[in-house]
């Protein structure tokens, strides 16, 4: 393998434009990039993006340099504009194959270094001046082309798996509509069937507190599931613990994340860590005897649930946020408990199919990661 500086491997395109209203439908933000896939399937903005945005061309590699630890890399699906908190990267074809280039940028070899040189405490950011001088070893162009062929086929298969997962979700949503989108079901406010509680606010003084416990934050809440790969700890008092402790069956709702696609996403806590508490940017919904967590979660992700969430969100400078008061006022149909149980049993059976597909996807991800690591000099990491 031959060693190159990063600016010999990639070109950082910095051309920008101030977005116009017509650019809203062709805008890709960091919130539209999903870790673990190069495919960009979501884009667009509810309002015209503010400030200068990077110009991108179809096929460009989009790298989320802000919070690089989230490992967001995608391939631009069209000509348009991209978040200024990212980078638009293009291959220098004398040393890197264009088809291999996106896989290199999404590799541990590159991303680990980008994370290492990121600066800033709240939103660590990788800057070009630090990235450009990093050195990486690349295989020959012929080997890169061979790898690109293998990895591209794997990426297509991953897309099929993700499609199956989406189909499973659609089946559950269709069953929900069939069972509950009908007149005559009593409507109640969420506060009538649940206890709703905000979380604990992080600050410097908590680092010195004697009681330190695991806590969930926005990063741990994915749509309809939890990501517990990194759970941090926080200091709190015994009195605070009693107010914000989590118990199995609690539903956690993201109050806001600067994006209409992120706000209001939720996940059910099943006591995976005990004890555990939650951050103030998560709203805890603890249901009483009239409703099941899975039923309420599915309603909140339905078209009517999303409509209410967005209608109740406060939009300040393009940032959407919810509050416990707004969550309490959400109107939700409350069918007989037996019907909710029937739906929950159906959804659980579909989840078993999803689990098998997800396992196959995880194994394929692990295989492609191993191949890249070996060919780029990291061994079996």
Image (cartoon, rainbow, N blue to C red):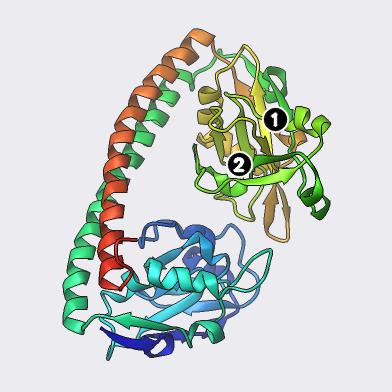
Q: Which mark is residue 264?
A: 2
Is 282 above or below relative to 49?
A: above
Q: Position of residue 106 (x, y in %)?
A: 38, 67
Q: Tell me the residue that label 1 is attached to.
A: 245
User: Residue at position x 76%, y 41% from top?
Assistant: 200
Q: Position of residue 347 (x, y in %)?
A: 40, 24
Crowd band around label 2 with a 10 angstrom C-alpha radius: few (<14), some (14–19), many (20+): many
Disc 1 vs disc 2: which is toward the camera? 1
Q: Position of residue 324 (x, y in %)?
A: 74, 35
**Residue 230 visible within the image:** yes
User: Residue at position x 56%, y 37% from top?
Assistant: 266
Is 350 above or below relative to 115?
A: above
Crowd band around label 1 with a 10 angstrom C-alpha radius: few (<14), some (14–19), many (20+): some
Q: Is residue 355 left or right of residue 156?
A: right
CB atoms at circles 1 and 2 under 8 Å apart? no
Q: Position of residue 338 (x, y in %)?
A: 48, 8
- 211, 137: nearer the viewer: 211
Mark 2: which secondary structure? loop
User: Residue at position x 33%, y 28% from top?
Assistant: 352
- 276, 98: nearer the viewer: 276
**Residue 75 visible within the image:** no
- 65, 260: nearer the viewer: 65
Q: Quadrant of the C terminus?
A: bottom left
- 93, 27: nearer the viewer: 93
User: Residue at position x 55%, y 19% from top?
Assistant: 292
Question: Spatial distance from mark 1 to mark 2, Cα to Cα?
Answer: 20 Å
Q: Is residue 312 left or right of residue 66?
A: right
């Amino acid at each position: 393998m031959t060693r190159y500086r990063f600016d010999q491997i990639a070109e950082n395109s910095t051309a920008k434009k101030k977005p116009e209203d017509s650019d809203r439908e062709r805008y890709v933000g960091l919130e539209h990039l999903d870790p673990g896939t190069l495919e960009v399937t979501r884009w667009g903005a509810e309002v015209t993006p503010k400030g200068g945005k990077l110009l991108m061309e179809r096929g460009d590699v989009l790298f989320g340099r802000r919070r690089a630890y989230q490992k967001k890399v995608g391939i631009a699906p069209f000509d348009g504009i991209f978040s200024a908190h990212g980078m638009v990267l293009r291959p220098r074809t004398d040393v890197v194959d264009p088809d291999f280039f996106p896989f290199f940028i999404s590799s541990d070899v590159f991303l680990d270094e980008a994370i290492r040189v990121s600066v800033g405490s709240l939103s660590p950011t990788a800057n070009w001046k630090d990235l450009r001088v990093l050195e990486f070893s690349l295989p020959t162009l012929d080997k890169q082309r061979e790898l690109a062929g293998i990895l591209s086929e794997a990426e297509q298969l991953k897309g099929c798996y993700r499609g199956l997962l989406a189909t499973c979700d659609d089946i559950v949503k269709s069953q929900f509509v069939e069972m509950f989108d009908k007149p005559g079901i009593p409507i109640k406010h969420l506060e009538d069937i649940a206890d709703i509680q905000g979380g604990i606010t992080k600050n410097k003084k908590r680092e010195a507190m004697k009681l330190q416990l695991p806590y969930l934050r926005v990063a741990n809440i994915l749509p309809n599931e939890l990501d517990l790969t990194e759970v941090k700890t926080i200091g709190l008092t015994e009195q605070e613990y009693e107010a914000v402790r989590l118990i199995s069956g609690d539903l956690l709702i993201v109050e806001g994340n600067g994006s209409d696609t992120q706000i209001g996403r939720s996940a059910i806590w099943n006591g995976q860590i005990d004890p555990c508490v939650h951050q103030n940017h998560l709203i805890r919904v603890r249901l009483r005897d009239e409703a099941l967590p899975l039923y309420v979660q599915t309603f909140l992700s339905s078209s009517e649930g999303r409509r209410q969430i967005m209608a109740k969100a406060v939009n300040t400078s393009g940032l959407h946020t919810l509050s416990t008061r707004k969550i309490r006022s959400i109107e939700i149909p409350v069918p007989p408990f037996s019907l909710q149980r029937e739906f929950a049993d159906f959804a659980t059976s579909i989840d078993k199919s999803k689990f098998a597909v997800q396992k196959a996807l995880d194994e394929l991800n692990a295989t492609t990661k191993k191949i890249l690591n070996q060919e780029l000099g990291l061994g079996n990491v």
